[in-house]
Image: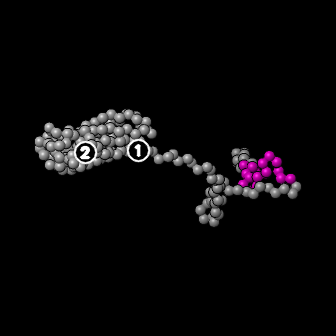
Amino acid sequence: MRTRMALLAAAVLLASCTEGVAPYAPGNGPPAQGEEPLPPTDVLPPREGSGATPPPAPVDEPGPEPEVPPPAVGPRGSASVVGLGAGDRGLLSVEQVDVDVTVSGVRGRHRVSVEFVPPSGLPYERRSAEVEARVDETRTVRFSLPVAGTAVATSGMSGTWQARFFLDGAPLTAASFTLDP
């Protein structure tokens, strides 16, 4: 009896199998007289060695190009030495050297620093100032290096100096000037 039940169940399962039979057109039931059924499709990958090739992958229609944001504008700086003429470069005639740094491309509050470096290459003096700006604004800060009556004049620190500028500790720009003996 169990054997008959098992055979009957297997027969029912095999009878309900639709592999190899084309499906009906959606919503229309069995094909009418003269209508062609839909072609069969493979839903499983082909077995190795079967010689069957998989159907081509569906081609997606190209969508709109993704918008690329404009490149971020980073901080920029430029520096210039002001008030130091060609005839006013002697250690005994220069009161101070003024250097302007112009910062742009920053937003919010930042620290601008200058490091005055004499010809020896060892930093002599460092100064800082706060700047606050919107990203579309430029800010100019003036830093002064006193010369008259300082170790610069009394020690004879003549030659080419550098003013190295930093924005929040990162190098920004530099300028150089010469003090004659």
In the picture, measured across the screen, residue 4 lies left or right of residue 138, that is right
Provide the residue span drawn in magenta: 13-32
Q: Residue 19 colored magenta?
A: yes
User: Could you tell me if residue 121 is visible in this image?
Assistant: no
Residue 108 drawn at (x, y percent): 40, 34
The image's mark for residue 74 is 1
Query: In front of the other: label 1 or label 2?
Result: 2
Camera-side residue of 175 and 121: 175
Count every numbered label the image shows and give the total: 2
Most common secondary structure along the magenta stretch: loop
Q: What residue is disc 2 on?
A: 84
Residue type for callout 2: Leu
In the picture, measured across the screen, residue 32 lies left or right of residue 181, that is right
Q: Residue 10 colored magenta?
A: no
Camera-side residue of 18 and 39: 39
Residue type for callout 1: Gly
